[in-house]
């Protein structure tokens, strides 16, 4: 039994090394199988929450590396079902990155995946996270638009929170530049 556990841990470490290889080069930081969203530096997080091709490439690079499907630049050579699976995980990760941004701003108290290593978010996506991928955290009462949020129907609060993402990204990046 101990051998099985050691092999599973070795596999996680290998998946992490493959997945984070591009991030280590790109961001000049160290990442491992235990890296969670709060462990990311502000600069790395700021880069990863932006919309655009560089962010997509970085996230695809991580997901594909963990899943042993090559590098992010090879995304377009995958078959359609693999692309769809990678995109589903990438969108989920992008949401979690943006929730971490909102958490650092004090806009949300927390989110469900905060303490789960990125490698596990990817490798266990289908079994543990796909069913809850559209869930959103709760806006804090201290946020200036909290009353508007409260006035929304329960089912519409997630959409309300997501509409705050562009403002959160801009605010986070401005704070990073001024610090």
Image (cartoon, rainbow, N blue to C red):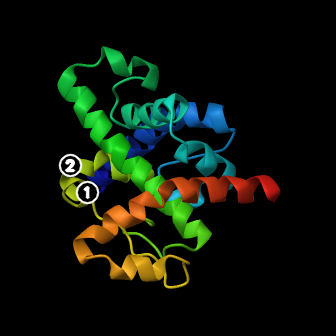
Left or right, 107 with reference to 27:
left
Give the residue displayed 42% in from the left and 56% down from the top: 96
Which type of secondary structure does the marked residue at label 2 adopt?
Answer: helix
The answer to whether mark 1 and mark 2 are in CB contact below 8 A is: yes
Question: Viewer-proximal residue, 170 or 73?
Answer: 170
Mark 1 Cα within 10 Å, few/some/many (few <14, many 20+)? Answer: some
Give the residue displayed 67% in from the left and 43% down from the top: 29
Tell me the residue that label 2 is attached to: 126
Where does the C terminus fall, quadrant-wise? Answer: bottom right
Left or right, 36 with reference to 10:
right
Measuring from the top left, give residue 79's x and y in whole percent: 22, 19
Give the residue displayed 52% in from the left and 38% down from the top: 20
Question: Hey, which quadrant is residue 138 in on the image?
Answer: bottom left
Where does the N terminus fall, quadrant-wise? Answer: bottom left
Number of numbered labels in the structure image:
2
Give the residue displayed 64% in from the left and 59% down from the top: 171
């Amino acid at each position: 039994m101990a051998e099985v556990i050691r092999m599973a841990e070795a596999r996680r470490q290998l998946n992490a090394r493959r997945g984070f290889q591009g991030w280590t080069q790109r961001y000049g930081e160290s990442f491992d199988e235990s890296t969670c969203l709060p462990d990311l530096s502000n600069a790395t997080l700021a880069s990863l929450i932006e919309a655009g091709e560089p962010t997509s490439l970085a996230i695809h690079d991580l997901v594909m590396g963990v899943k042993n499907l090559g590098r992010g630049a090879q995304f377009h050579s995958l078959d359609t079902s693999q692309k769809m699976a990678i995109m589903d995980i990438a969108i989920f990760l992008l949401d979690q990155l943006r929730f971490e941004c909102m958490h650092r701003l004090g806009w949300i108290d927390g989110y469900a995946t905060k303490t789960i290593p990125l490698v596990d978010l990817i490798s266990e996506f289908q079994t543990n996270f796909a069913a809850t991928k559209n869930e959103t955290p709760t806006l804090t009462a201290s946020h200036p638009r909290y009353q508007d949020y409260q006035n929304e129907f329960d089912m519409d609060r997630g959409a309300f929170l997501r509409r705050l993402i562009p403002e959160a990204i801009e605010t986070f990046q401005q704070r990073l530049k001024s610090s």
